[in-house]
């Protein structure tokens, strides 16, 4: 008799024992098999687990995919955020590490502005001349300029407003360049 559902087991029916108690197969799986971290159903066969220790737990083969878009991982590369696997795009979305210019994920060097905008260093350029900016930049109406082009932007803007003073408006800011740690597995 199954300890859980109290059903008499048929002759030849598969059963499992746990702590000297007998369970029918279905109950044993429900009660004791590891649960899939995605769908929370028991995982019997075809369990996937990440071997590198970055992710704990098990998944059904079909459930081990990006937990947002549910696309499988090409070449088995995935990213870990908050103990769940994600594709590159959704990892960077969650991690707030998408480039403000090209909208691709930033791995390695990242330019962070005072506004909290992040860029690939190669995407961190003046709106006008596309020249790469270093550790200082200028902001005008949420756009980023080099020193020469912020002067021109302010010049244009001040033609209608002769009372304002260029040097007061010159909004010089500092960039932070740092190394993004990505949880690529
Ligand atoms: Zn049972
Ligand atoms: Zn599952
Ligand atoms: Zn995804
Ligand atoms: Zn970029
Ligand atoms: Zn420029």
Image (tube, rainbow, N blue to C red):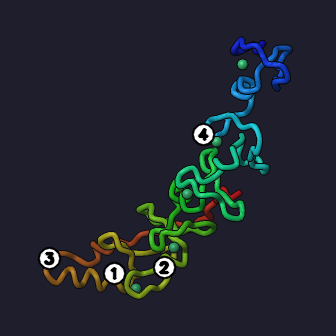
Label located before the other in sequence (4 or 3): 4
Dot 4 or dot 1, earlier in sequence:
4
Image quarter in which the C terminus is found: bottom right
Relative height, residue 59 to residue 77 (above, below): above
Q: Of helix, strand and loop, which one carries label 2? A: loop
Q: In this view, does 176 lie above or below 30?
A: below
Q: Position of residue 119 (x, y in %)?
A: 50, 70
SS for dot 1: helix
Q: What element carries label 3?
A: loop
Q: Which of marks 4 and 1 is in front?
A: 4
In this rendered view, identify the residue nearer to me: 117 or 87: 87
Task: State which quarter of the image contains the N terminus.
Answer: top right
Which residue is disc 3 drawn over?
A: 163
Mark pair 4, 1: CA separation: 53 Å
Extreme front residue here?
A: 11
Along the line of sight, the residue nearer the viewer: 169 or 133: 133
Quarter of the image for residue 12 reads top right
């Amino acid at each position: 008799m199954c300890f859980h559902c109290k059903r008499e087991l048929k002759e030849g029916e598969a059963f499992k024992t746990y702590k000297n108690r007998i369970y029918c197969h279905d109950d044993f799986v429900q009660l004791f098999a590891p649960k899939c971290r995605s769908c929370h159903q028991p995982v019997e066969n075809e369990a996937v687990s990440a071997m590198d220790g970055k992710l704990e737990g098990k998944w059904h083969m079909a459930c081990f995919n990006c937990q947002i878009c549910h696309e499988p991982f090409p070449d088995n590369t995935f990213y870990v955020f908050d103990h769940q696997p994600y594709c590159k795009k959704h990892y960077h979305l969650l991690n707030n590490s998408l480039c403000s210019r090209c909208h691709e994920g930033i791995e390695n060097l990242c330019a962070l502005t005072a506004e909290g905008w992040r860029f690939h260093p190669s995407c961190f350029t003046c709106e006008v001349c596309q020249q790469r900016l270093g550790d200082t930049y200028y902001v005008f109406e949420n756009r980023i300029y080099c020193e020469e082009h912020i002067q021109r932007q302010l010049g244009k803007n001040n033609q209608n407003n002769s009372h304002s003073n260029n040097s007061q408006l010159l909004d010089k800011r500092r960039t932070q360049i740092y190394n993004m740690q990505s949880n690529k597995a």
